[in-house]
Amino acid sequence: MRYHFDPVRAGIDAVSARPVIVLLGTATVWLVLGSIFGVMASLKLHWPDWLNQSAPLTFGRMRTLHLNLVIYGWLSLSGLATVMWITPRIFHVPLKSPRLVLVGAVLWNIAVALGGLAIASGWTDGEEWLEIPWQIDMLLAVAGACFIAPLVRTTRARDVHHIYVSGWYFLAAILWFPVLFVVANIPGLHSGVEEATVNWWFAHNVLGLWLTPLGVGTAYYLIPKIIGRPIYSYAVSLLGFWGLALFYSQVGIHHLIGGPVPTWVVTLSVVHSVMMFLPVIAVAINQHVTVAQNLWALKESVPLRFISFGALMYTMASFQGSIEALRSVNSITHFTHYTVAHAHLGAYAFVSLVMFGSAYYILPRATGRAFPWPGLLKLHFWLVVIGFGIYFFSLTIGGVLQGLSMLDATRPFSESVELMKPYLEARSVGGTLMTFGHLVFALNLLGLAFYASTRAQNTVAAE
C-alpha cells in the first residue's frame, strides 16, 4: 500500500488541469453576472420604480436570472471543477476522457446562456428552480452526461480499493442529480398538487443531494489536506454520508405545509428534516474538531479560512433548516424573507465559500503559478463574510417580524410589507458587499492568468 502518493509526480494533476481551469473560469463569469442581477433584484424591492421600463428588467426576471445563473452557472460548474480535480487524486489515476469534459463544459455553458436569454425574454417553465425551459434542459442533460462518463471511467480504473469519504459524496452526487433533473423536467408528466410536490422535491434536493455532497466532499478532502492531519474519525464520516442519503430526499415537502397535500406527506418531510440532525452532527464532529485542533492553520492558509467557515455554515444551515421545518416555526417563517436568508445560508455561506477556498487551493497547482496579490484573497474573504452577515441577519430578523405581522389579524397586510423596508435596504448593502467580493475573486483569477505569468511565477511545491 502506498502511503505517500504524489499526484504531481504521477502526472494526475496535469491531465485534470485544463478541464478544471475552463470550468472554474466560466463558473466565475456566471458568478459575476448572477451577482449583478441579484443586486438589481434586491434594489427593486425597496426601489420599485427603478429600471421598470422594460419587461426583462422587472424583478421577476432579474431574480430568476440571478437564481439560475448562480445555481447552474457558478455552483454547479465550480463544484464539477473540484470533483474533476479531487477524484483522480483520491483514486490515484489520471482523469479519463478529459476532452469529453471540455465538450461538456462548452455544452453546459451554452445551455446556461440560452436558459438565461429565455428567462429574460419571459419564456420559462414557471416553477421554482425549474425555470429554464425543458427544451434547453435537454442540452444540460447531454452536457451532464459528458461530465458523468469520465468520472465513472476514472472510478472504474482506480488504483486503490478503499474509497475515501469524498469519493462517496461525489459519486452519489453525480448519480442523484441526473435522476432529480430528468424526472422533474419530463414535460406533461406532472400536474396540479403532484406538480407542486415534485417541484419542491427537486428544488430542495438540488441543494441537499447535489450541492451539499459537492461541498461536504470538498471540505472532507481539503481540510485535512491543507492542515496535514487526518480527519477526526473515518467511521463517523460514513455515518454522515449514509444519514444524508437516507433522510434528505423527502425534506423539501415542508415547503408545502398548509397546502393541499396529504398531511402524512408533510409529516414525513418534517420527520426527515429533524432526523437530519444526525448526519449533520457527524460531519460537524469530523470537520470542526479537525480544524479546532489545528487553529494555527487558519492563520497560515486563506483557502482553509473559506473552507472551514463554509463547513461551519453547513452545520448552521442544516440545524436551522431542521428547526424551520417544524410546523410551529414554519407557520411564522413561511412566505417571508426569513426563508430567503436560510436559502443563502446553505447555498452561499456553505457551498460558495467552500468553492472559493477550493478554487484558491486548486488553481495555483493547476497552473504552476502563485496568486500575484495575496492581500486580495483576504479582502475577498472579509467582503463576503461581512456582506453575508449583514444580508443574513437583516432578512432573518425582518422575516420573523414580517411573519408575526402577517399572523396578526388586527394588522393590515400592508404593514408587513412596510416594516420590511429597512431590512431590505440592509439586504442590498450586504449583497453589494458580497458582489464586490466576487469582483475581487474574478480579479484574482485574472491576475493568476495574466499578471502572475510575468511577475509572480512560482511553481507550487509538490505534495
Image (cartoon, rainbow, N blue to C red):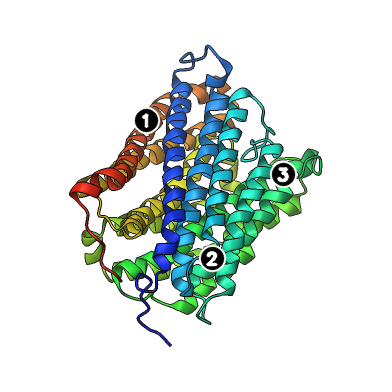
Which residue type does callout 3 highlight?
Asn
Q: Tag 3 or tag 2, which sits nearer the N-term?
A: 2
In front of the other: 218 or 281:
218
Q: Residues within 10 Å of mark 2 (few under 14, many from 20)?
A: many
Residue 394's place in the image compared with 319, above or below, is above
Q: Quarter-wise, where is residue 169 in the image?
A: bottom right
Nearer the observer, disc 2 or disc 3? Answer: 2
Q: Mark 3 highlights which residue?
A: 185
Which residue type does callout 1 highlight?
Ala
What quarter of the picture does the N terminus occupy? bottom left
Q: Tag 2 or tag 1, which sits nearer the N-term?
A: 2
Q: Residue furthest bottom?
A: 1
Q: Report, in whole angstroms, how far the alpha carbon at label 1 lies from the one at label 3.
A: 36 Å
In front of the other: 55 or 138:
138
Q: Report, in whole angstroms, how far the alpha carbon at label 2 lies from the one at label 3.
A: 29 Å
Does the rendering let one see residue 43? yes
Q: Mark 2 highlights which residue?
A: 96
Residue at 33% across / 37% down in the picture? 439
Q: Secondary structure at mark 3?
A: helix
Q: Secondary structure at mark 2?
A: loop
Q: Mark 1 highlights which residue?
A: 426
Residue at 41% across / 70% down in the picture? 286
Horizontally, residue 99 falls left or right of residue 229, namely: right
Q: Quarter-wise, where is residue 146 in the image?
A: bottom right
Horizontally, residue 449 falls left or right of residue 413, namely: left
Which residue type does callout 2 highlight?
Lys
